[in-house]
Amino acid sequence: CTDSQMSQKKPYNAGDETEVRKAASESEKFADAEYESLKFIMSDERGMRFIWWLLSECHIYQTSFTGNSQTFFLEGERNVGLKVMDRLHRQHLKDYLRMVQIHAEEDDS
């Protein structure tokens, strides 16, 4: 967008029912796309392997306290992992459980 295009955009009006419905519809489309994307990732073992790695890198089952400012950085990583974990639990629990089972079997061998 150029500056002139941005200045021509009218601001969002939360009192306009049409604008509110349009924003809600766009939000639902985005949420549906996120759901479908994660579903696609979790439908393949390679995708599950990536999600497993991501959750491991986020240290969700470890303390983030270090006693210094590094705690803030680690807590940021952990927060991302918890958001991914929440989404998996709420929307793709069966796939998540299958991923855990696959990695548990790999650890046993």
Image (cartoon, helix red, strand yellow):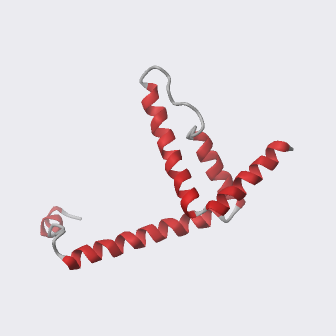
* 87 lies above or below 76: below
* 17 lies above or below 53: below
Can you tell which quarter of the image residue 94 is in? bottom right
Is 101 left, or right, of 29 in this rendering?
A: right
The residue at 49%/50% (across/down) is 83
The residue at 45%/33% (across/down) is 73
Q: Quadrant of the N terminus?
A: bottom left
The furthest residue to the top: 67
**Count of numbered labels shown in the rendering:** 0
Is 7 left, or right, of 64 in this rendering?
A: left
The furthest residue to the bottom: 18
Residue nearer the viewer, 6 or 109: 109
> In x, y percent, where is residue 22?
28, 76
The residue at 25%/73% (across/down) is 20
Is 35 left, or right, of 1 in this rendering?
A: right
The residue at 54%/60% (across/down) is 90
> In x, y percent, where is residue 60?
57, 40
> In x, y percent, where is residue 76?
45, 38
Can you tell which quarter of the image residue 18 is in? bottom left
The furthest residue to the right: 109
* 11 lies above or below 59: below
* 76 lies above or below 25: above
Q: Quadrant of the C terminus?
A: top right
